Image (cartoon, rainbow, N blue to C red):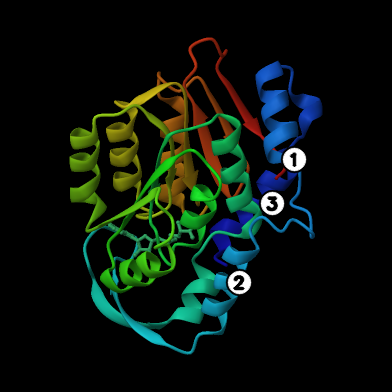
Amino acid sequence: MNFFIIKEWLKYFHLQTDEHSLHSPYFYKFYTELIKPKHRRNNSAFDEIEKQRKVYLKSTEDIEMLDYGAGSKVLKIDRRRISEIAASSISQKKFSIFLNRVINHFSYKNVIELGTSLGINTAYIAHNTLSNITSFEGDPSLCTIANDHLRFYRNIKIIQGNIDDTLALHLEESNEPLDLAYIDANHTYEATLKYFELMLNYCHANSILVFDDIHWSREMKEAWENIKRHPQVTASMDIFDAGLVFFNPDFSKQHYILNF
Ligand SMILES: C[S@@+](CC[C@H](N)C(=O)[O-])C[C@H]1O[C@@H](n2cnc3c(N)ncnc32)[C@H](O)[C@@H]1O
């Protein structure tokens, strides 16, 4: 963990509140029904996905990976152990369950994930939902692995390639209203704002954009602050692991920092 995140965590820890600070009925319900319920130990709905996570965590296989660093250019080709990727760069169960709950609650149909990695979170957001998931990944080895274990999901499509090229093309070609996007790939200021602006054209009053790692670095924090201030954003939530933005024009501009 870097020093910047530790400082950010301490700030968040002091500022976070819970449902008692939420006067808007929409956000009270959103928090108490979608964020607050912790997954229970006996929740078996996701057992198969967790079994797959364990397979990856135990894997001794190495893969050749295109290293984008925190940018959009391939810096080098790395050899990385699958178990290390599973341990360090995929979403936690608690967070993936939260995304699944949001998608189900609003019966979202069109969902985008930027950054598939091993496809564990992709499985969560596709599992028992009515949504069509389009997930974007630049690394060919990760695409092969994810496509293999996600092959039984009819509602997942993985688009391989640099998101800088593939996202705009996909949005243009599909030309559909976007319900939810989870942005978890290229953690730079420029890319985060570029993807936000591209997706904004397809958002509606009930869309939600979820930005991962908003406290990961100074530039990600700055990108998040700019996104929050955008005139089309009518409310935002910081749950530390991610930031959520809302577009309903009936909301009075509010920024919530909430315990997750
Ligand atoms: C943090 S991981 C995604 C984790 C996944 N969303 C989850 O929750 O488990 C980020 C992924 O984004 C991919 N990535 C980063 N920059 C990219 C780019 N410019 N184009 C395509 N993929 C990119 C990386 O290869 C990596 O697999």
Q: Which residue is mark 1?
A: 36
Q: Which mark is residue 10?
A: 3
Residue 131 sits in quarter: top left
Residue beneath the point at 45% across and 50% down:
218
Q: Quadrant of ligand 1?
A: bottom left
Q: Position of residue 177 (x, y in %)?
A: 34, 26
Residue beneath the point at 72% across and 33% down:
33
The one of 113 and 241 positioned closer to us in this rendering: 113
Q: Which residue is mark 2?
A: 51
Q: Secondary structure at mark 2?
A: helix
Amino acid type assigned to the residue bearing label 1 in the image: Lys
Q: Which mark is residue 103?
A: none
Q: Is residue 8 visible?
A: no
Vertical comparison of 95 with 61: above or below? above
Q: Earlier in the sequence, mark 3 or mark 1?
A: 3
Q: Earlier in the sequence, mark 2 or mark 1?
A: 1
How far apart marks 3 and 1 lie (CA) works out to 21 Å
Amino acid type assigned to the residue bearing label 2 in the image: Lys
Amino acid type assigned to the residue bearing label 3 in the image: Leu
